[in-house]
């Protein structure tokens, strides 16, 4: 009922607020629109939830609404104080207005813009509608993420006793070494709404669909007119696989979000030499590596690009690399240490042998 929807809104809004505040702090010296800050902020906030939940899990603090809520509220409080009392010379945006041009009210161009806009809004509505009406259906989302997250939710923890046959949700997850970002988000949402709902548990997903569109629009907008940015956004929104992942709750969409956003900010650093853009890029790429193991390749590629860029600019090869490496290291370090400590290995780990219930799906 409405009570459930209200709790769901809180579960989505809290991470959004913390991410928005963090990006507001990091992007002070950058030209950045409210739309872009909101979209990047959502992904970063969800990434923070993933890290908080993971750290609680390895510290063997039971997963409850309060244990997952308190660190987020503290984080919001600290970031808000930092934003209020920190160095406040906010860069004002000198960007061309990001609003769409409606002059000559019903010209052919305006008509085209309205059609494109209405299509994008229809796609967003469709993804949310489907997301709210359909349970988890794809075996990928179930086996890699949700069945393990469900186990963690009901166990109220990661079950880290290696002698236990279900150590770290073994046999509830296809690969024990699969990263946990979206799984932890599901644990958080379930605790926030007070039960495990096969529909609501994946409602983080449609928001990634909306925000990846916002990230693309903002990125194209750095170089092109708002109309061209809108058309690019339209083409991305029309990709069938993207709208499927938007309602399905699989990790490919968040990985795409972090890879795209991280690459945009890497480009901003290379193009405009904005040091803070590189910090944001590192943070986003690290969140991608905690979403799927493939995310690590984006980090390696970004490092290589920085290296080549420095050589071409006649700088020391490692110039500026620390700006990228520090957020990556801080964010992803606990996950890799954990994997080494329990002998899971750096990749997927061995495939689960005991998943016999899959055959009946």
Image: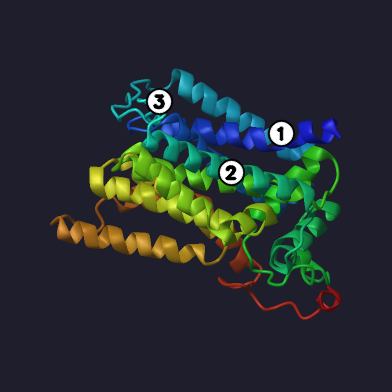
Label 1 vs label 3, nearer the camera: 3
Quadrant housing residue 11? top right
Picture layout, residue 102 above or below residue 192? above
Quadrant housing residue 113? top left
Q: Position of residue 328 (x, y in %)?
A: 45, 53
Identify the residue position indicated by label 1 in the image.
9
Q: 327 or 256: nearer the eye?
A: 256
Mark with earlier residue (1, 2): 1
Instruction: Tally the numbered discs.
Output: 3
Q: Position of residue 317 (x, y in %)?
A: 22, 60
Q: Residue at x 51, y 34 (%)?
A: 38
Q: Residues within 10 Å of mark 3 (few under 14, many from 20)?
A: few
Label 1 vs label 2, nearer the camera: 1
Question: CA–CA distance between discs 3 and 2?
Answer: 44 Å
Identify the residue position indicated by label 2 in the image.
48
Q: Are marks 1 and 2 in contact (CB under 8 Å)?
A: no
Would residue 311 be found to the left or right of residue 275 on screen?
left
Q: Position of residue 81 (x, y in %)?
A: 52, 22
Identify the residue position indicated by label 3 in the image.
105
Query: What is the secondary structure assignment of the residue under circle 2?
Result: helix
């Amino acid at each position: 009922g409405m009570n459930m929807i209200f709790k769901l809104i809180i579960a989505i809004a809290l991470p959004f607020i913390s991410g928005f505040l963090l990006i507001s702090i990091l992007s002070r010296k950058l030209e950045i629109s409210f739309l872009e800050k909101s979209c990047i902020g959502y992904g970063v906030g969800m990434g923070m939830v993933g890290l908080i939940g993971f750290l609680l899990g390895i510290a063997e603090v039971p997963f409850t609404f309060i244990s997952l809520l308190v660190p987020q509220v503290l984080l919001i409080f600290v970031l808000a104080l930092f934003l209020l009392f920190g160095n406040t010379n906010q860069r004002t945006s000198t960007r061309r207005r990001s609003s769409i041009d409606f002059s000559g009210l019903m010209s052919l161009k305006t008509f085209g813009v309205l059609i494109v806009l209405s299509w994008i809004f229809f796609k967003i509505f469709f993804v949310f509608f489907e997301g709210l009406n359909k349970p988890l259906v794809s075996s990928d989302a179930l086996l890699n993420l949700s069945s393990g997250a469900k186990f963690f939710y009901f166990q109220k923890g990661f079950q880290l006793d290696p002698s236990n046959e279900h150590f770290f949700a073994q046999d509830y997850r296809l690969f024990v070494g699969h990263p946990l970002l979206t799984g932890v988000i599901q644990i958080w949402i379930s605790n926030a709404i007070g039960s495990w709902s096969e529909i609501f548990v994946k409602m983080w997903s449609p928001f990634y669909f909306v925000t990846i569109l916002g990230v693309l629009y903002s990125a194209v907008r750095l170089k092109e007119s708002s109309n061209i940015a809108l058309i690019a956004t339209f083409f991305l929104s029309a990709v069938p696989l993207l709208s499927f992942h938007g309602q399905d709750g699989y990790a490919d969409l968040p990985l795409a979000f972090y890879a795209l956003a991280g690459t945009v900010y890497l480009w901003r650093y290379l193009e405009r030499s904005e040091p803070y853009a590189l910090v944001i890029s590192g943070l986003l790429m690290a969140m991608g590596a905690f979403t799927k193991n493939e995310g690590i390749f984006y980090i390696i590629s970004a490092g290589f690009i920085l290296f080549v860029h420095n050589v071409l600019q006649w700088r020391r090869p490692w110039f500026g690399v620390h700006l990228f490496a520090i957020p990556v290291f801080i964010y992803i370090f606990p996950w890799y240490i954990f994997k080494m400590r329990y002998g899971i290995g750096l990749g997927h780990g061995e495939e689960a042998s005991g998943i016999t219930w899959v055959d009946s799906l």
